Amino acid sequence: MLKAKPREPKADVFIPPPKLPPPAPVVDLGEAEMRLAQALLFFAYRDFTNVADQVLEELGLGRAHHRALHFIGRNPGITVSGLLAILRITKQSLARVLNALVDQGYVAQAPGYEDRRLRLLTLTESGQALERRLFECQREKLAEVYRAAGPQAVEGFRTVMRALMDKGALAYIDGTGSPEDT
């Protein structure tokens, strides 16, 4: 008796793949989960900034001063308008912060090279030392939790944080945008 050969499909005939069930959601996206995420962000920010807050308090400064020091330090020669764009605060609020930092000798202002109406901001030596001291406080905390969490968790953290940022801030972080784009 001859056995029938199984038929091979013709090359020009489409055979659809088997239907797979939809992928399970990675995370429960219900209200309880989202409220937990929100609380985690609030408390993490509070506790992360607390280590620097103690140093700032000794100097009569606050978080707004810290943010200004950070971004001036990362962008020497940044304009006041560039800093305003990053911080998203009012001119009046920034004026108070900058006046304190200039008066205490942490920030220097110079007129623009081409447009002398611009004020270019840089950290003085003492401003650089203070910014470094604040960074080291937070670096130790962050390094400790990064080591405990492991590389996959760190990458997941970065993915989530980047997804929370708008395109301008992402471009700035990636080095493809300017402070004014944030």
Image: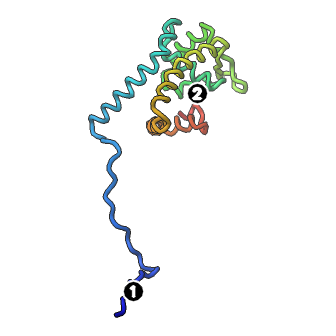
Please, what is the three-letter code of the amino acid marked with disc 2?
Gly
Which residue is rendered at x = 53% and y = 6% of the image?
Answer: 59
Examine the rendered structure and indicate whether residue 179 appears above or below residue 99: below
In the image, farthest residue toward the bottom: 1
Left-right relation of 56 to 4 = right
| Frontmost residue, 145 versus 178 | 145
Which residue is rendered at x = 63% and y = 25% of the image?
Answer: 78
Please, what is the three-letter code of the amino acid marked with disc 1?
Lys
Which secondary structure, mark 1?
loop
Residue 30 is situated, as x and y percent measured from the top left of the image, at 27, 39
Residue 27 is situated, as x and y percent measured from the top left of the image, at 33, 42
Can you identify the residue that label 1 sits on? Answer: 5
Q: Earlier in the sequence, mark 1 or mark 2?
A: 1
Which residue is rendered at x = 58% and y = 12% of the image?
Answer: 101
Is the residue marked by circle 1 packed among few (<14), some (14-19), or many (20+) residues within 10 Å? few
Can you identify the residue that label 2 sits on? Answer: 82
- Using the rendered view, name the quadrant where residue 19 is placed: bottom left
Which residue is rendered at x = 59% and y = 13% of the image?
Answer: 130
Q: CA distance from mark 1 to mark 2?
A: 75 Å
Specify the quadrant that holds the N terminus.
bottom left
Report the number of discs.
Answer: 2
**Numbered mark located on residue 180 in the image:** none
Which secondary structure, mark 2?
helix
Residue 143 is situated, as x and y percent measured from the top left of the image, at 52, 26
Residue 153 is situated, as x and y percent measured from the top left of the image, at 45, 36
- Using the rendered view, name the quadrant where residue 4 is placed: bottom left
